[in-house]
Image (spheres, rainbow, N blue to C red):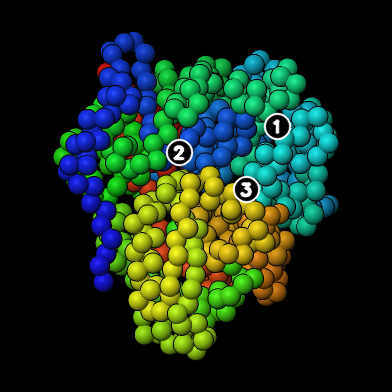
């Protein structure tokens, strides 16, 4: 088999280098101000109005910089998978008398960037903004972005100025994890702008470690330190953060080599030797990442488990890792093997003969499938050559694959809308985070998460799985919950819920001038501790 090449080519790279000055201007002149310039994989500036778009890259660079959530992620260490920590809430616990009620104590003394106070009223206002259609501040776009995290949310009430109580529809032992993705915006700023979401995005106000400075739509977003940030240890150490959308890997590489930026996401594997020889820092680390395909369980052919199993047996994951220059792990299941609840899932090792036999048994030869894929995006790694390799491997065993290529945000929209609007698509290649049981597993297998209400895009349904999930959510003791989570993960493989391919090692390249960065085992990273030398 011919493996698709990731070769950038010296001619193309040199040509791109030559264009960078025209695109971005000359390198920033020496001055007292230190600037960290980041080239993202996103094709546009992530939304600045609260919950961002552009996938988790939007949360990484905009969401957790301009804003805080009630619960944050501990990104201070690189030797363990990141877990949640107090954010705008200092403590939380389930009500001893009601397993559907969570009590949150809020942090005192926090102010939004506009000077207004953060308190319980702010929390109520924000959740009404995301959930209460008819409320003056209701934002349909924020509702769409928050929806999959709030499928079990029933309501929130104020107990006092700095205490709130959340009620869930069903007992939910991992509910706090979902609150980590919901950004708190300033009610005062929104009301000042008559709750105009577009106007708010142009002049946002949160409580995060960075303040909005200026934005050139489609080109750059600039933020400056919030000197009054409540966590004094995380007041940014650089004077300005500049975010630049660059979906082309070659453009990102060229801009770093020419000194136009200081940091690039997802360098192409074949450019890494060049980057290293030029003195750049190339940093990798394992993190909870799943590069896979969510499947359409409503229509043929993936409503037949034999076809799903055949697709998994057709994937030569070692070839994929080799093509990626070793900056990935083979993916045989939803979560990486280092995860506590990995268990002993069925392992679909490369077996083309078995794949062919299963397709023949299912009566699907040739087996026509269409996958929706992106040109770039958060966590998507190198989506075009990776999908071409998957296509070649599947077609070797009897599939006929059509790749429907689209922009990252367009693919995310297909994911939100669900299979009912996209019966012509048999699978979507949206990389997923697996940092907690809900986001890594539950939301793709629960019937209550059927799209568009949640993230179960293809409407997978399995009563045994739903029963296990309900048991896990009703088990508040972590040790007792672990074997249930393990069984859920194993059950996903038994049902061949996805086509699994790889787990990323999260490569990024930094200028030698960049110091102080600790790469967390997370989709999110803390830029506040980064310094840039002259």
5 versus 358 height, above or below: above
Q: Quadrant of the C terminus?
A: top left
Which image quarter: residue 169? bottom right
Spatial distance from mark 1 to mark 3, Cα to Cα? 16 Å
Is residue 532 something one can see in this rendering?
yes
Q: Quadrant of the N terminus?
A: bottom left
Report the front residue among 386 and 32.
386
Left or right, residue 426 beside residue 248? right
Residue occupying the point 72% across, 35% down? 139
Could you say which disc has been placed on residue 274 in the image?
none
Could you say which disc has been placed on residue 43 in the image?
2
The secondary structure type at the circle numbered 1 is strand
> Mark 2 near mark 3, Cβ–Cβ under 8 Å?
no
- Image coordinates for residue 68, horizontal then vertical, percent: 60, 32
Report the front residue among 368 and 503.
368
The residue that mark 3 highlights is: 177
The secondary structure type at the circle numbered 2 is loop
Which image quarter: residue 12? top left
Is residue 442 something one can see in this rendering?
no
Report the front residue among 167 and 382.
382
The residue that mark 1 highlights is: 106
> Mark 1 near mark 3, Cβ–Cβ under 8 Å?
no
């Amino acid at each position: 088999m011919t493996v698709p090449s990731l070769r950038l080519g010296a001619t193309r790279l040199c040509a791109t280098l030559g264009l960078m000055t025209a695109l971005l201007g000359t390198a920033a002149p020496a001055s007292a101000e230190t600037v960290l310039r980041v080239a993202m994989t996103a094709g546009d500036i992530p939304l600045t109005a609260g919950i961002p778009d552009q996938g988790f890259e939007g949360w990484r660079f905009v969401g957790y910089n301009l804003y805080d959530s009630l619960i944050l992620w501990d990104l201070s260490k690189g030797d363990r998978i990141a877990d949640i920590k107090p954010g705008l809430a200092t403590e939380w616990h389930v009500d001893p008398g009601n397993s559907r009620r969570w009590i949150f104590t809020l942090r005192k003394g926090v102010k939004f960037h506009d000077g207004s106070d953060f308190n319980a009223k702010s929390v109520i206002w924000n959740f009404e903004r995301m959930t209460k259609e008819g409320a003056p501040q209701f934002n349909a776009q924020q509702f769409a972005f928050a929806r999959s995290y709030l499928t079990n949310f029933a309501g929130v009430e104020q107990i006092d100025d700095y205490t709130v109580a959340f009620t869930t529809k069903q007992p939910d032992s991992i509910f706090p994890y979902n609150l980590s993705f919901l950004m708190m915006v300033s009610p005062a700023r929104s009301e000042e702008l008559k709750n105009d979401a577009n106007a708010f995005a142009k002049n946002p106000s949160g409580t995060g470690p960075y303040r909005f400075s200026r934005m050139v739509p489609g080109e750059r977003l600039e933020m400056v330190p919030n000197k009054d940030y409540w966590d004094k240890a995380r007041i940014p150490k650089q004077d300005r953060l500049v975010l630049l959308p660059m979906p082309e890997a070659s453009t990102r590489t060229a801009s770093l080599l020419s000194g136009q930026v200081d940091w690039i996401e997802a360098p192409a594997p074949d450019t890494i030797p060049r980057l290293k020889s030029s003195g750049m820092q190339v940093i990798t680390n394992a993190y909870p990442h799943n590069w896979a395909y969510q499947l359409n369980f409503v229509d043929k052919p993936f409503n037949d488990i034999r076809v799903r199993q055949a697709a998994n047996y057709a994937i030569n994951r070692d070839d994929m890792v080799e093509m990626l220059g070793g900056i990935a792990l083979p993916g045989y299941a939803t979560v990486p093997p280092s995860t506590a609840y990995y268990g002993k899932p069925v392992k679909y090792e490369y077996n083309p003969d078995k794949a062919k036999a299963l397709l023949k048994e299912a009566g699907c030869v040739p087996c026509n499938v269409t996958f929706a894929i992106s040109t770039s995006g958060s966590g998507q790694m190198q989506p075009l050559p990776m999908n071409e390799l998957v296509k070649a491997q599947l077609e070797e065993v009897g599939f006929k694959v059509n790749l429907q290529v689209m922009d990252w945000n367009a693919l995310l929209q297909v994911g939100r809308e669900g299979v009912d609007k996209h019966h012509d698509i048999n699978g979507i290649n949206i990389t997923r985070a697996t940092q907690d049981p809900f986001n890594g597993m539950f939301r793709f297998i629960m019937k209550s998460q059927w799209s568009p209400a949640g993230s179960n895009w293809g409407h997978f349904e399995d009563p045994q799985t739903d029963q296990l999930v309900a048991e896990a959510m009703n088990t508040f003791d972590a040790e007792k919950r672990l074997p249930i989570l393990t069984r859920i993960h194993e059950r996903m493989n038994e049902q061949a819920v996805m086509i699994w391919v790889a787990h990323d090692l999260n490569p990024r390249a930094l200028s030698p001038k960049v110091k102080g960065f600790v790469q967390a085992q997370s989709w999110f990273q803390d830029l506040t501790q980064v310094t840039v030398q002259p």
